[in-house]
Amino acid sequence: MRDIVFTRRSGWIPNVVREDGELKLMIGAGADANHEPRTFTFSIGEAHLAVIRTDLARHLLLWSAVLPLCDAAGTRGRLDEDAAVALLDPILLSSPADVDALFGRIEWDRGRLVAHGADIDALDRGQVCVAMCAATETSDTKRAQQDHAQRRRAERGTVLGPLDAAVLRYTGQYLHGATVPRRIPDAVDPALLPEVVRVIAAAEQACAGMRISRDPRRGKRATDKRDWNRMATTVDAAVRGAHPELGDDAVRSVTSLMCSEAADRSRNAPMDDDEEADGGPVGSGGNVRKTALSFTDDKGVEKKWLSGHARTATAEFWEFVGERSAGDNEVFTIEDEERGEGIQLHFYADSIARVTTVRAGEDGADPEYRVEYGLVDGIGGYRTLVGAFVRGGCAALGEHGPWVSDVAEFERARRRRGTA
């Protein structure tokens, strides 16, 4: 039987309960293997209860000191109750000087104290009792997050100027640099917002007209890393040139914002269509636009495309790749059975093979094929080659060479590129 003896307004501050006639402090902390909250208890005395009732600061200090013990218990371990009980007298019944000295020796949860109003300067000086003079039962988690972010930057030797901080708040990355950036003008001091807007305008002007394409090789919503890096480099140089006073964190947040927005525009648009308008130039192969094609992957899955389809062949093919591509499925083929030709894309090797029928099989004999290999420069290179094949067949690929028929020679060329 468990009865609550004392509780505060905040449900997370530890409660005092009576369990089978014994006083215990009950703490909710961490989670089990099923992500359900864990609860820990350990015995306290009447003298400890009296302090907990009347002294919020001491109550919070005890909580801060016990939380690391709860963390050490993990998802299924037991709380070290002896260690928890050993904290009671030194924190609840000792002088402020002794409490400060104890906190200089043990591990404790700083964020919990900051969230409940601790004076940050006093904490930094090691005066935990003074720091908790203005403690509150209500919690401000954002205050703790800001303190953590500032300490993390200080460890890296980073000092933010007013404009740096304003830019990070605008992009939503003040608390954590890994947060997906977005535009939050209301988070910025109105006096600094015009200057932040000028920083963003410089970035937008620098990358106007640039785009980050989809990269179906890595999934339906993946985007081209090369495009991302190219845009990031462009924005970085422009922002540093226009605002040399900005630090690295702020500049990175702006480049990340520009790139993330460009990537989202691509992800939310239909799969890219690389085909040129009818009648456009197709190279030496002439205009032999395909009327029927077969797409296959390395798992034997096939998809047919006919010229009457609502979507173009290239859009359909890259949609097929985005749906099927995986670490163990990196070879895709486009075949024109009517003309006896096709291409095979080897994403794992940044290479492609074009296959043409030299002689059709007759009287039970196998057909004879000519296979030529070429190196490919990223997803942009693949898009160019697929578009050229769809528009003009294997003949249109000639200008995108060199093409090598000797496998050993091609492998040497591929290795040379890999070590360049």
Image (tube, rainbow, N blue to C red):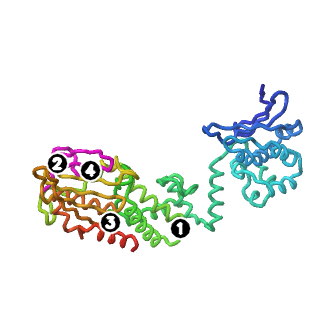
Pointers 2 and 4 in contact (C-beta within 8 Å): no
Q: Earlier in the sequence, mark 4 or mark 3?
A: 4
| Residue type, numbered disc 2 | Ala
Q: CA distance from mark 4 to mark 3?
A: 19 Å
Q: Quadrant of residue 11?
A: top right
Q: Earlier in the sequence, mark 2 or mark 3?
A: 2
Relative placement, left or right, of 186 versus 158 is left
Residue at the top extreme?
Answer: 1
Question: Is 304 a magenta residue?
Answer: yes
| Residue type, numbered disc 3 | Asp
Residue 355 is tagged as: none
Q: Earlier in the sequence, mark 1 or mark 2?
A: 1
Q: Crowding near pointer 2: few (<14 within 10 Å), some, many (20+)? A: some
Q: Which residue is mark 1?
A: 248
Asked whether 365 or 3 is in front, the reply is: 365
| Residue type, numbered disc 1 | Asp
Residue that appears at 38% across and 63% down = 226
Check the image and report above or below for 173 versus 41.
below
Q: Which residue is mark 2?
A: 292
Q: CA distance from mark 2 to mark 3?
A: 27 Å
The residue segment tinted magenta is: 288-313
Q: Which residue is mark 3?
A: 377
Coordinates of residue 397 in the picture (x, y in percent): 20, 64
Relative placement, left or right, of 69 versus 152 is right
Q: Which residue is mark 4?
A: 317
Q: Crowding near pointer 3: few (<14 within 10 Å), some, many (20+)? A: few
